Amino acid sequence: MFNHPRPSVNQTLRLQEIEGELEIILKREDQIHPDISGNKWRKLKYNFQHAKQNGHQSVLTFGGAFSNHLAAVAAAGHQYGFQTHGIVRGEELETQNLNPTLEYCTKKGMVLHFVSRSLYKIKKHALASVIIDDKYPYVIPEGGTNELAVNGCAEILTSADKEFDTIAVAVGTGGTMAGLIQSTYDHQHVVGFQVVKDIEIPSRIRTFVSNDRWSLVPTYDEVGYAKTPKSLIDFAHCVADQTGVILDPLYTAPMLWHLIKNWKENTWNFGNRLLMIHTGGHQSIKGVNQRLAQQGSSLRWPC
Ligand SMILES: *Cc1c(COP(=O)(O)O)cnc(C)c1O
């Protein structure tokens, strides 16, 4: 039941800018499931298995209005037979038209509960404030990172990936990176491109891992989280045109953009051949394009 339907393949990224110098092999985790994208499937696998084994009938989680995690939980609940509940940050959203992410969640059967930002900050209080028909939902934290999620992400790398010294991944909460770190061989180093400013990421990762073969590279200063500047959109088009790969606006595009920038500026310290995880996240593109249109921009993220 909890098997991903499609294999994860490694694909060489052929980009003119780096051809013959920097070798990037993309692990296409974005293709392993049609609805539950990339690392989110990995993170949810053992959580849903646990929920099923323990007789839970519903799953509850938290997220912002454009959250990939929320969309993944809704899709997984739909597929595996759970009622899902999403506690969404921002009570003002209740009276607005649903954005594509929240509309998708609803279509997959998720019940949305909108709470104020202050209430949302303290998850226990947010949880206590919503009325649901199930007393014992299985609760998954915001972003989905817990021990079971990390165990799922430890299955991303296979023994065939042993040949790589450097593994690159985009970091939101750090759960995916923690799983990768846990599953590396002694000669491997994991580089996480941190897209959000969250000072708790290193300590969170340390609670799950037992080696120090990892580094964080911040990307939020230059690209900004969820800002999608023109330079990033142009870059995503360039990658799509040359390689056929669609990157997502929040995680994988900032990661690759930043890597190439560091490479050009000679500030990249992690080798010239790397395995980069495409963690998916395509569901956010619709919302980004809708926002660009609303702002009167003629730019669109490739899709
Ligand atoms: C959620 C997400 C991440 C971040 O995963 P964490 O485990 O929270 O660090 C990376 N890439 C994509 C596409 C995501 O949706």
Image (cartoon, rainbow, N blue to C red):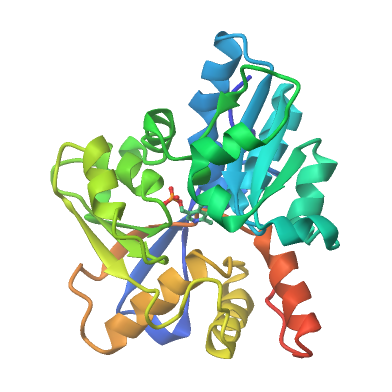
Q: Residue at x 49, y 65 (%)?
A: 252
Q: Residue at x 42, y 28 (%)?
A: 148
**Residue 237 visible within the image:** yes
Q: Position of residue 292 (x, y in %)?
A: 73, 81
Q: Position of residue 111 (x, y in %)?
A: 77, 37
Q: Residue at x 50, y 35 (%)?
A: 124
Q: Is 88 left or right of 189, judged from the image as shown?
A: right
Q: Residue at x 60, y 82 (%)?
A: 233
Q: Is residue 281 above or below residue 243?
A: above
Instruction: Indicate the quadrant containing the C terminus: top left, top right, bottom left or bottom right.
Output: bottom right
Q: Is residue 58 above or below residue 125?
A: above
Q: Position of residue 78 (x, y in %)?
A: 76, 31
Q: Is 98 left or right of 200, judged from the image as shown?
A: right
Q: Position of residue 212 (x, y in %)?
A: 14, 48
**Residue 141 visible within the image:** no
Q: Quadrant of residue 211?
A: top left
Instruction: Indicate the quadrant containing the N terminus: top left, top right, bottom left or bottom right.
Output: top right
Q: Quadrant of residue 229?
A: bottom right
Q: Is 36 left or right of 220, judged from the image as shown?
A: right
Nearer to the camera, 301 or 56: 56
Nearer to the camera, 73 or 300: 73
